[in-house]
Amino acid sequence: MLVKVFPALIRSSIGDVPQPLTAEQEASCFFHPQNRAVTPCEECGRFLCSLCTLEIPGKTLCPLCFDANLRGRKMQNLEASRTLHDSVALALAILPALLFWPVLVTAPLTLFWIIRHWKSPGSILPRTRARFYFAAVIALSQIGFIVVVIVAILRVRR
């Protein structure tokens, strides 16, 4: 899953209304010629109105340069995607349960994954830890089932 966060959503000047041009000598926005420019893009130099200005920490960019930087992974301080560790743990617990032998490896691996990534950043959107709990219950029940099967096999052999 890929989530793009648009920095204009979190900037403090949300709701700035672009000012219309009042004289021919004023600079206009590259994307909206009817609006007065308030700042240039620091990468390409295009003049931008208050609607088009994207204020990244330490930079002011136009939408095209922002998109190009995001695709080229040039911006280090922007998070374009995250691993959903709770979904990985749940998949590790459920998918191998269709076959018996992979569970010998994936059930302990699921518990390790849950412990290892319990405090890792979750989704950019708010989520609960319910998937972690569900994956842990499935993995523990698989381990319990394996222990019961092994004990039963050992008793039959005696």
Image (cartoon, rainbow, N blue to C red):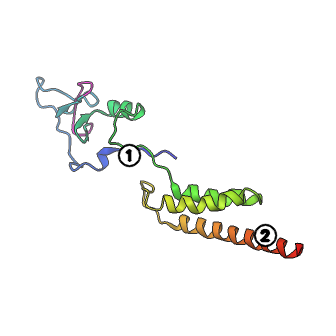
Badges 2 and 1: C-beta atoms under 8 Å apart?
Answer: no
Which residue position holds label 2? 150
Is 50 magenta? The answer is: yes
- The amino acid at mark 1 is Val
- What span is in magenta? 43-52
Query: What x and y, as percent, mark residue 35?
Result: 21, 33
- Judge whether 97 appears above or below 15 on screen: below
Q: Judge whether residue 108 can be spotted in this image.
A: yes
Secondary element at tag 1? loop
Residue designated by label 1: 5
Q: Nearer the viewer, residue 151 or 95?
A: 151
Residue 79 against residue 95 in the figure, above or below? above
Point out residue 18 in the picture as x, y percentages from the top left corner: 20, 40
Which label is found at residue 42?
A: none
Amino acid identity at mark 2: Ile
Q: Is residue 145 left or right of residue 36?
A: right
Taking the image as shown, residue 55 lies to the left or right of residue 108, namely left
- Residue at 60 percent across and 60 percent down: it is 110
**Residue 50: percent from the left, percent from the top?**
21, 39
Please report the residue visible at 61 percent of the width from the left and 58 percent of the height from the top: 109
Task: Name the magenta segment's main secondary structure.
Answer: loop
| Disc number lying in front (2 or 1) | 2
State the residue lying farthest toward the front. Answer: 158
Q: How many marks?
A: 2
| Residues packed near mark 1 inside 10 Å, few (<14), some (14 to 19) or many (20 plus) | few
The local secondary structure at tag 2 comes to helix
